[in-house]
Amino acid sequence: MSTNTINPNTWVDKYSDYLFNYTVVRVDDKEIAQDLVQETFFAGLKSMKNFKGEASERTWLISILKRKIIDHYRKINSNKGKAEIRINYTSDSETEGDWLEERVADPFDGNADSKIENNELGLAIHDCMGKLPQKQAQVFKMKTIQGFETEAICNEFDITASNLWVIIHRARTAMAECLEKNWF
């Protein structure tokens, strides 16, 4: 039987400073940290019935707070690139404030020069990949070009995820150096 109990009447006095300090280090903004701690307390109140007493009350609140912090960063990152950018690029009142994307060049409407450059770049990339050690080239190709999941590559080559990222980093560095010498 669990000895840990929950008492929301004492949360602010007992845990608010600790939770705030924990949060402000991770989000680097006092107001956001305060909001996240407040959201944690609200979420704790809503899910009190789920408290099993297997962990201390503080540990349970921290686990809720961690999810709030993760959600905060997910929200920030999901909004990147979605800003509504409106510009007045014509004096015509019918099109005033039209979306910027309407005026972006069509990427499929390339001229012959860009097609030649793309072919040359492709050949340079292929040549540089051929200069990588075999295992490094295979791992790089599977992850970067073919889009395999980390776990699948690790299982295929019997390596750890850390080792995979070291291999990828070294391959990218070598590719950048090779392309700088042979392409730019």
Image (cartoon, rainbow, N blue to C red):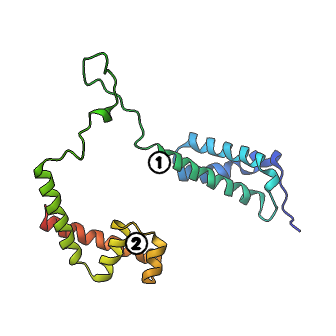
Q: Residue at x 13, y 57 (%)?
A: 117
Residue 13 appears anywhere in the view: no
Name the disc covering residue 165, or none: 2
Q: Amino acid at mark 1?
A: Asn
- Residue 4 in which image quadrant: bottom right
Q: Is residue 168 left or right of residue 46?
A: left
Residues tagged 1 and 2 counted as in contact (Cβ below 8 A): no
Estimate the x, y position of residue 111 in percent, counting from the top left. Answer: 13, 47
Q: Residue at x 32, y 20 (%)?
A: 96
Does label 1 or label 2 sit earlier along the sequence?
1
In this rendered view, identify the residue nearer to me: 118 or 175: 118
In the picture as drawn, the residue positioned furthest to the right comes out as 1
Quarter of the image with the C terminus in it: bottom left
**Classed neighbour count for the residue bearing mark 2: other residues with Cα under 10 Å, few (<14), some (14–19), many (≥20):** some
Estimate the x, y position of residue 50 in percent, counting from the top left. Answer: 79, 55
Estimate the x, y position of residue 26 in percent, counting from the top left. Answer: 54, 53
Q: CA distance from mark 1 to mark 2?
A: 22 Å
- Disc 1 designates what residue? 77
- Residue 61 in which image quadrant: bottom right
109 in relation to 93, above or below? below
